[in-house]
Image (tube, rainbow, N blue to C red):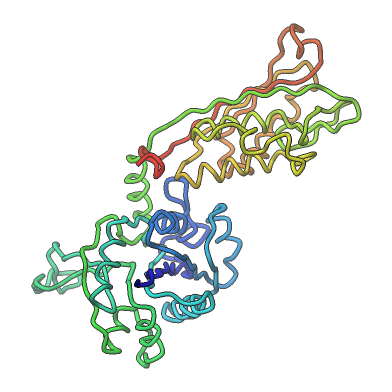
Amino acid sequence: MASLMIATALIVAAGKGQRAGGAVPKQFSTVAGKALLAHAVDAFIAHPDVDQIVIVIGTGQIDLCISALAGRTVDAIVEGGAERQDSVRNGLDAITGLGGCDHVLIHDAARPFLPAAVIDRLLDALKTSPGAVPALAITDTIAHGSDLLGSVVSRDGLFRIQTPQAAHYDAVMAAHRAWTGPAATDDAQMLRSAGFDVAMVAGDAELEKITQPADFARAEAMETTQMISRTGMGYDVHRFQTGQELWLCGIQIEHDRGLSGHSDADVALHALTDSLLGAIAAGDIGDHFPPSDPQWRGAASHQFLEYARDLVGAKGGIIDHVDLTLICEAPRIGPHREAMRHRIADLLRVSLASVSVKATTTERLGFTGRGEGIAAQAIATVRTPKVSNEEK
């Protein structure tokens, strides 16, 4: 019986992305609420025939990478080199350290939208060829010239080569070892130089490379048309208890009593967590953090909110807005409102304008009116893909 082929995705994310502008390299910039790198990683995670994922980053970019991945698990993250081919080689060496593989798909993080059908076509081509690339025929008129239109170049036989560039692992390693020319722009070039055939398969317009600031606007517009807005609601109550610290919205409030609960009893963050989970139909906070589990005794509730945030991100969601109402007679929320908004915005990685915190009383009616505890209501508005991977 033939053994199963092992395929590894090698994502090159080591560039500086200077042409795209922005505060961070483009591979860590976001489109539709998710870093370009995360879009690429998700495409490979979702494909059943991809077994491993290795990411190559630039020097000093590990924190940016971890933040961009938002809890996603990959098999290795390694630093790249001075040129793209050096970065790819470092990634290939990391794959060797993982035990090697049969096939490798070398992909640029700057091409975040990778259809599964392209991966299918590449892996199928590797059954008969040691290398394969996705390509699109050039349809625009091509001309020589600078300020004035020059001579027109025939489009016959001209193609735009995209990534991933796929290869038998042994072949691409041999090609890298044998390369003696100037810095190579892609791996297919090196494979052909080493004598290996490289097949072309149909590429996809979604695989356009993001390079300039305008490319981000185009990609954002394309992605948001594929999303739908959903709303989740959360509600929580905790009673006051003498001798406890009072935590609300992730900050400690001076008060004569705190709230009683299995964790730090931050009623506000608990309601917000449930609202996010509700927006993606992922149950409630008790499903993910059971009160019966001793590991959550006294735990800081920001962990629960960050978990829900990452779960939204893993499903391709974008947190557009959260609205929180605290219901209590005391303490007064007004003096702490802005600090609360800032803390929630930091935890959710959204702008301050996307966070609303309000307070009200019940005119001394009910348990909150009697000063027995605090209640919180929260609503979260989240955009998610119209059809999630689980619903397909």
Residue 106 visible in this rendered orientation of the protein? no
Q: Quadrant of residue 265?
A: top right
Q: Tell me residue 42's x, y (percent).
A: 43, 54
Quarter of the image with the N terminus in it = bottom left
Of 32 and 119, nearer the camera is 119
Q: Quadrant of residue 388?
A: top left
Q: Tell me residue 140's x, y (percent).
A: 14, 62
Q: Is residue 131 above or below residue 35?
A: below
Left-right relation of 77 to 133: right
User: Who's the residue at 41% across and 80% down the image?
Assistant: 85
User: Who's the residue at 45% across and 66% down the image?
Assistant: 18
Quarter of the image with the C terminus in it = top left
Q: Quadrant of residue 236?
A: top right
Q: Is residue 225 above or below residue 45?
A: above
Q: Tell me residue 88's x, y (percent).
A: 44, 77
Q: Is residue 238 above or below residue 23?
A: above
Of 127 and 149, nearer the camera is 127
Q: How many marks?
A: 0
User: Who's the residue at 41% across and 70% down the image?
Assistant: 6
Q: Tell me residue 232's x, y (percent).
A: 52, 28
